[in-house]
């Protein structure tokens, strides 16, 4: 992948890096709700509700078992609308800058 010169300013890159470092640090105090391995375009999550996200996670776990994600699902973590909203927000904040730089890697969802 090649990022064209001038696509991202130094200021913008540093702001994104600072935000990602803040996410990393906050993850030491409480769980940072993000699971990039869902085999789903992360930008598509923007329109998901509790039921849709739980269905996506359940289908993912059928194909690719993951004890940690399964445990959180079994414990009802993703039944809380606020938790789902935080999960989606975190996902969008992490992957949106990547999608802008690499649109072939993470294409804009079809409406």
Image (cartoon, grey):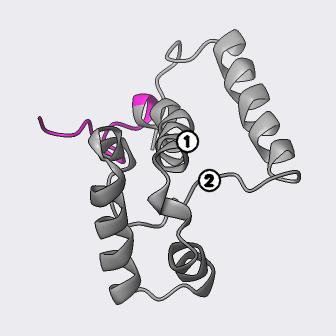
Q: Earlier in the sequence, mark 1 or mark 2?
A: 2
Task: Name the magenta segment's main secondary structure.
Answer: loop
Residues 77 and 86: in front is: 77
**For residue 56: magenta?**
no
Q: Residue 33 carries which label?
A: 2
Q: Which residue is drawn at 50% across and 53% down?
A: 80
Q: Where is residue 9 in the image (x, y as percent from the top left)?
A: 62, 12
- Alpha-carbon neighbours of circle 2 within 10 Å: few (<14), some, or many (≥20)? some
Residues 19 and 53: in front is: 53
The range drawn in magenta is 100-111
Q: Give the image quarter of residue 17.
A: top right
* Image quadrant in which the N terminus is located: top left
Q: Which mark is residue 86?
A: 1
3 shown above or below 63 = above
With 61 as the anchor, is 23 left or right in this view? right
With 18 as the anchor, is 98 left or right in this view? left
Instruction: Say what secondary structure mark 1 lies in.
Output: helix
């Amino acid at each position: 992948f090649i990022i064209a010169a001038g696509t991202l300013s130094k200021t913008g890159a540093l702001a994104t890096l600072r935000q990602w470092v803040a996410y990393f640090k906050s993850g030491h105090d409480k769980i940072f709700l993000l699971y990039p391995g869902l085999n789903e375009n992360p930008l598509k999550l923007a329109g998901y509700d509790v039921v849709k996200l739980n269905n996506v996670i359940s289908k993912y776990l059928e194909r690719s078992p993951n004890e940690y994600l399964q445990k959180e699902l079994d414990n009802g973590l993703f039944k809380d609308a606020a938790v789902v909203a935080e999960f989606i927000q975190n996902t969008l904040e992490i992957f949106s800058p990547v999608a802008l730089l690499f649109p072939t890697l993470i294409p804009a969802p079809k409406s």
